[in-house]
Image: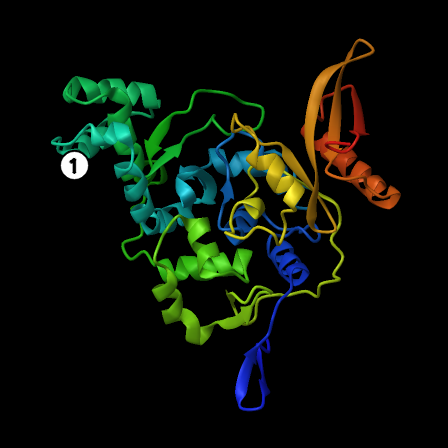
Amino acid sequence: MAQTTFLRGDSAVTRVLGVRELNRATLERQLLLRPHDLPVTEVVERLVGMQAQTPHSWYAGLWARIEGFRPEHASEPLAGRELVRVALMRSTIHLVTAADCLALRPVVQPAMDRWLYANRDVRSLDGLDLAKVVAAGRELLDERPRTTGELGALLHERFPEGRPAALARVVRDLVPLVQVPPRGIWGASGQTRHATAETWLGRPLDPAPSVERAILRYLAAFGPATVQDVQTWSGLTRLGEVIDRLRPGLAVFRDERGRELFDLPDAPRPGADAPAPARFLYDFDNLLLSHADRSRVLTEACARTRSGIKNGVLPGTVLVDGFTAATWRIDRGKDRGKEGAVLEVRPFAALSRRDAEAVEEEGARLLHFAAAGAAAHDVRILPPIGG
C-alpha cells in the first residue's frame, strides 16, 4: 500500500504529488509508457472506454497502446458485438465493451437527463408524454437500425406537435443507443444508424448500476484525481459525498495547489523521472479530456491551440517527455505522380535534436499503420507554431 501520510509533531501531513508524478501515474494507467501485448477488449475495459465520436481516429489510440495492433483487432469485435460505440461519459460517443455499455449507461443517465432538459428544442415538447415518445422510439429502432433523421421523421408522424429533431433527441438521451456497423469499421463507411443497446446485445442493462464502481474504475485508469476530475470525466455532479463514502478504502494525496487527490492504494505511481517515449494521440483521446485540471499532460501552448479551434475538428497531439509538445495531421496527396502520405508535425516550441528524432521515428511507425496503402511516406517537422 502506498504511504500517503507521515507524522510531523502531532499532525498528519498528506504527501504532495507534483505535476510530473501525476503525469507518469496517468500515462502508466493509460498504457502510454510502453506498448502492451493485450487483447483490444481488455485494453478498452482498462481504459473505461475510448471517446470515439469520429468513425476511425480512435484506432490510432489503440495502435499507440497495443503492441502489434492491426485494425481488424478492433473491427472484428466491433462487428461481433463484443465492442460497441454508445453515448456515455459527457454524453459523447465512447467505444466500450458490451458489458461496460450495459453497466455504465445507467450510471451516467442523470447527466444525460440534465443535458436533455437543458436543450431548447426539447423544452418545446412541454406537455408531450415523453414516456410515449421513448416507447415509440424503442419500437421503431427494434424493427431495424435507423438514422437520427429517419427516427425523427417517423416519430413526427405519431407526434405531429413535436419537431423531428427534438423527438429524436429525446430517444437518443433517454434510451441507450449504439451506433451499429459498418459505422466505425476500419476502411468501411456508412450512415450513422442506431439500435437499442439491449436489443443489439441481447441483454438488459445492469439492474444494479453502481456509481461507486464507476469511480473506482476511473481512478484505476486516470488517477490520482480530485472530485472535480471525476465529475469532468463522467459528466455527473455532487460526487463529493460518494467519494467520502469511499474514502476509508482510498489513498489520499494533495497536489501542489493543496487540492485533495484520491487514488486506489495499490495503483501504480511511477517516479517523476520514469521514461516517457514520444507518443501520438488521436484527436479526442481521453487522456486529454478526462480531468478538470489537465496540466498533468496539457501544456499552456496546447491548451490555447485547442481552445482556439472554432469548427470542433481537433488535431492530433504529440507527447514528448509525457507532455503535449506538438500537433499532427496526415496529408494524403500526390508524390511524384503516386499517392503519398505526409505526416506533418507542428511543435509548440523548437524540439531538441534528440526529441525531433524520436518524434520522426514514432511518426514513421504511425504512417505505416494509418496509411499502409500509400506508395510513399514522409514525416515533416514544421516550424514551431508562431515561430
Instruction: Tell me: residue 179, above or below residue 107.
Output: above
Within 10 angstroms of label 1, few (less than 14), some, or many (20 or more) residues?
A: few
Query: Disc 1 residue type?
Result: Ala
Residue 341 on image: x %, y % = 74, 22
Q: In which quarter of the image is the N terminus?
A: bottom right
Instruction: Tell me what residue is drawn at x 60 percent, y 70 percent.
Output: 16
Which residue ends up furthest to the bottom in the rendered image? 10
Seen in the image, is 262 located left or right of residue 275? left
> Is disc 1 placed on a helix, strand or loop?
helix
Q: Quadrant of the C terminus?
A: top right
Q: Position of residue 260 (x, y in %)?
A: 50, 67
Q: Which of 212 and 120 is in front in this view?
A: 120
Q: Can residue 212 be seen in this view?
A: yes
Residue behind mark 1: 131
Asked whether 168 or 116 is in front, the reply is: 116
Residue 347 as seen in the image, left or right of residue 186: right
Task: Identify which residue, 205 or 158, lies in the foreground.
Answer: 158
Please state the horizontal and vertical placement of residue 251, each as a whole percent of the image.
52, 72
Q: In this view, does 250 lie to the left or right of 159?
A: right
What x and y, as percent, mark residue 245?
36, 70
For residue 329, above or below residue 300:
above
